Amino acid sequence: MSNSRTPEILVTGGAGFIGANFVRRRLASDPGARVCVLDALTYAGNRESVADLESDGRLHFVHGDIRDGELVLGLLRERSIRTIVHFAAESHVDRSILGPDAFVDTNVVGTHELLKAARTVWLDEAPGTHRFHHVSTDEVYGSLEPDDPAFSETTPYAPNSPYAASKAASDHLVRAYQHTFGLETTTSNCSNNYGPFQFPEKLIPLVLMNMLAGKSLPIYGDGSNVRDWLFVEDHCRGIEAILERGAPGRVYNIGGLNEQRNIDLVRLLCEVVDGRLSGDAELAERFPDCPASRGDRCDSLITFVKDRPGHDRRYAIDATRIENELGFRPVETFETGLAKTVDWYLANGEWCARIADGSYREWIDRQYAERTETFPNQPKRVAR
């Protein structure tokens, strides 16, 4: 049983990319905050991302699975938790294509176990103020054509990958527990996140770590797929606004107000790294295989690879509701957020090296080895 009177929140997936950033922000911004992290530490979970926060006793880490209903019940009861922020999920589209089962198990079954435990403790055993916040994705809405309006909270669901379908199913379960049982829930659907501590199978850290190592920068198809990019700390700020002021049962879209084609994003990232390394002898010595360390351009590493099945063309978020109702807007521009991201990875080379030594690299290499077929009229290496 927690001895503190300060309410403790449960953060599932708190050792993952977005979860770790949320936990770090929560503890840094509120000296009285207490957080219980529940994380299964699968391939993308890294306890090292929050380990330095455990020393003062405000972070309680539990290595466990959200599908373990008895474990979740015990945490809610013993630690007097009245708020759950649910990040835990399998979240990579490519992995969902290769193995959908894990996505259904974690994203659907796991979310349902959390909802059942919350209903038991918060509605049946100890009724009172509570909140179950579910973190979802804009991918549940499907794909947009170039001139289509951005996704709003009323856009019909049309998931196109096993990952997106599993998240859509979990969204519906959360809504059903609000509507049927009266569980006080909120849901946020976010656009593509980037920033510190991101696992390097995702585009920005993958490309960044590859260019520092002098490896090819794989771009699906012709690189014209469009995403709205949200700096992770802005996402965490949006979730805080929902927890503080969001109405139970409400859905809020959180976007970065920043649409970028993949190829333009990668070229901008190359420019940032070129600028950082070209005039810094210490960085050039640390990353000798990066083209910028020897005066060349990183965009010489760009490689177009075979597109993945069912690759959605465009995502874009209409964040009018969260701005009008909760007064939230992202603080970072794409340029400032990308600069902060690059600087974090450059300053945390040991973290990156330990991640790169893991099994993900073998999986990534296998993935792209299977997509070596270039597209007609697309050169294998492209430089501006």
Image (cartoon, grey):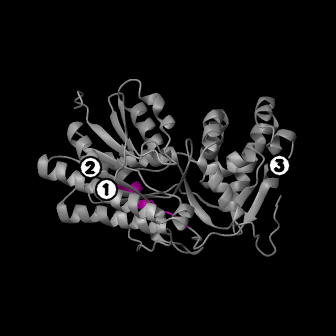
Q: Which residue is mark 3?
A: 297
Q: Earlier in the sequence, mark 2 or mark 1?
A: 2
Amino acid at dot 3: Arg
Neighbours of disc 2 within 10 Å: few (<14), some (14-19), many (20+): many
From mark 2 to mark 1, how far is it between C-alphas?
7 Å
Disc 2 secondary structure class: strand
Q: Earlier in the sequence, mark 3 or mark 1?
A: 1
Q: Earlier in the sequence, mark 3 or mark 2?
A: 2
Amino acid at dot 2: Arg
Corner quadrant of residue 348: top right
In the picture, the quarter occupied by the N terminus is: top left
From mark 3 to mark 1, how far is it between C-alphas?
45 Å
Give the side of residue 353 with respect to residue 284, left or right.
Answer: left
Amino acid at dot 1: Thr
Disc 3 secondary structure class: loop
Query: Is-magenta flag for residue 270?
Result: no
Which residue: 34% across, 51% down?
Answer: 66
Q: Which residue is mark 2?
A: 131
Judging depth in this view, the residue of 341 and 376 nearest the camera is: 376
The disc placed on residue 186 is 1
Give the side of residue 245 with respect to residue 230, left or right.
Answer: left
Q: Are marks 2 and 1 in contact (CB under 8 Å)?
A: yes
Disc 1 secondary structure class: strand
Tell me residue 242's x, y (percent): 35, 50
Give the residues in magenta.
315-325
